[in-house]
Image: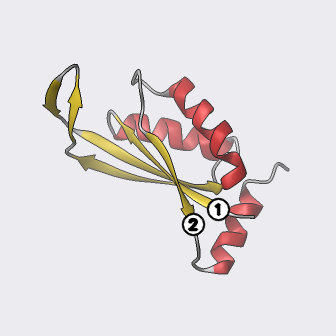
Amino acid sequence: MPASLVYVTTSDAGEARTIGRAMVKARLAACANIVPAMQPIFWWDGEVQEGEESLLLLKTRQDLVEPLTTAIKKLHSYDCPCVVAIPISGGNRDFLVWIEAETTPR
């Protein structure tokens, strides 16, 4: 089963932890990694903005990207959260098999 890495920006590490834990608990993701601090520069409301955010990385199956995205949007504080999936084209086969196993309902 093909896998994806899902990149999500959040308002802070607490929000990343809440969302990540919920996605893993629901088996929509096998694993969540949190990078607690990053500094985005972006357009919003016609102006260049700067701020502080956290990064949430989720490992999942490609067929779960849509339901994962829907679930994230329900929990996220942003009106238009960044949730983008990057297909995994290769890597440690044992790890990719683990992703599939941990995202299969029990």
Residue at the image position 39 percent from the left and 24 percent from the top: 78
| Residue ranking furthest to the front | 46
Point out the image quarter for the N terminus.
Answer: bottom right
Query: What kind of element bears circle 1?
Result: strand
Q: Residue 32's spot in the image, x, y percent?
A: 52, 53
The reply to whether callout 2 and callout 1 are in contact (CB within 8 Å) is yes
Which residue is disc 1 drawn over? 3
Q: Amino acid at mark 2?
A: Ile
Q: Tag 1 or tag 2, which sits nearer the N-term?
A: 1
Which residue is disc 2 drawn over? 88
Q: Amino acid at mark 1?
A: Ala
Q: CA distance from mark 2 to mark 1?
A: 5 Å
Direction from residue 35 to residue 42 in the image, left or right: left
How would you rate the neighbour count of disc 2 (Cα within 10 Å): few for under 14, some for 14-19, many for 20 or more? some
Give above or below for 98 relative to 35.
Answer: below
Q: Residue 74's spot in the image, x, y percent?
A: 56, 24
Direction from residue 89 to residue 48 in the image, left or right: left
Residue 85 got which mark?
Answer: none
